[in-house]
Image: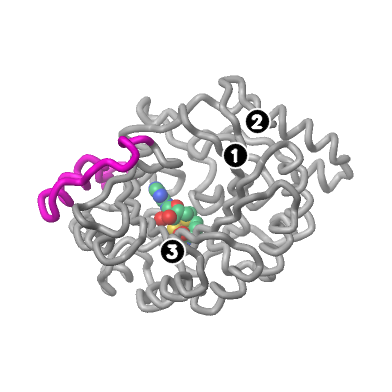
Amino acid sequence: MPYDRFGRHLHYLRISLTDRCNLRCVYCMPEDMTFMPNAALMQDDEILRLVRIFASLGVDKIRLTGGEPTVRPHIVDLVRGIRQTPGIREITMTTNGLLLSRLAKPLAEAGLNRVNVSLDTLHAGKFRRLTRWGDIEDVLDGIRAAEEAGLQPVKLNAVVVRGYNEEDVVEMARLTLAHPWQVRFIEMMPFAGATEFQRMMLVTAEEMKARIEAALGALEPVDGGRLDGEARLFRLPGARGQVGFIASVSQPFCAACTRLRLASDGHLRLCLLREDEADILTPLRAGATDEELRRLIAAAAWRKPWGHGLAEGEAPQDRTMSQIGG
Ligand code: SAM
Ligand code: SF4
């Protein structure tokens, strides 16, 4: 399986379960976002069939995302179904954590391995400004529930936005002194809908790192500074956890990319930041056999673009982050 024409082994599939969300983060979607009708989304049986086909091609790692994956009905059953698929060795989820206090335990019991919880600040007011209406206490409860349920190590994702939370990187990094968490700081990427805002309010990983080091001391590279997925990892002196930087804009890691993305409407997105996609759901609904779908997927994977074009000023204008699945 899917190898692309550059020899990258595409064994990691991110599935957007829905474009819907119970928040409206300023860097992700407009407040008056219009969502797709339910019938346009992949249904549970369609997702499970596609997971089987991807697994038969060599995909062994699945991340469930969205939109907000926990607002999808039957999410626990879906995780259980994916867990039962031969060949899948790891299932993770990226979530805003709002519903985790209720769902962490059943999700862990159904076979979810870990969660990445998005949390950009530790201040209730700033959290509300970034998410437009979220209550930070719900997320903190969710993180506790995830730990108790054994969804460890918990990873926190923080998108850093100038004028909103660039100073908070210090407090967020400080969390790793007491907790065995991985706190990952993400450079904001441009998408349709908010491209100008996303470009203007970008804070680079270099600036985040300098802020953290000025306040908390030198960050020691973990594993010789090699990439761990998309993050470069560091450790503060004496820390239990790790600090990571995802510098998609200023230091792209396209050469090491092993992912494919299935958008919630069943389009296979070959690169987060490129518009090229292959519609898999329409042929599936038209009666394509597993073998036909397998060939369609392998052919699309083969043409995965080498990398994104942010440095050349290109940004995808066809979808928001929430539709593709971050
Ligand atoms: N709703 C879930 C959540 O927020 O974790 C999952 C979907 S969200 C689109 C996935 C990740 O993308 C989150 O960590 C979010 O912070 C990040 N994200 C959203 N918009 C982004 C942007 N413009 N640039 C970089 N990361 C972004
Ligand atoms: Fe929702 Fe996640 Fe996008 Fe925030 S980042 S609006 S929580 S999908």
Is 176 on the left or on the right of 248, as rendered?
Answer: left
Q: Give yes or no for contact between labels 2 and 1 (Cβ–Cβ under 8 Å).
A: yes
Main secondary structure found in the magenta portion? helix
Q: Which residue is drawn at 78% across and 31% down?
A: 295
Q: Which mark is in front, 2 or 3? A: 2
Whether disc 3's CB lies below 8 Å from ligand 2 is answered yes
Q: Distance between the residues labelled 1 and 3?
A: 25 Å
* Residue span colored magenta: 198-226
The residue wearing badge 2 is 301
- Could you tell me if residue 30 is visible in this image? no
Q: Residue at x 32, y 51 (%)?
A: 185
The residue wearing badge 1 is 260
Mark 2: secondary structure: helix
Amino acid under disc 1? Leu
- Could you tell me if residue 239 is visible in this image? yes
The residue wearing badge 3 is 24
Is 6 on the left or on the right of 27, as rendered?
Answer: right
* Front position in the image: 64 or 296: 64
Q: How far apart are marks 2 and 3 (CA)?
A: 31 Å
Amino acid under disc 3? Arg
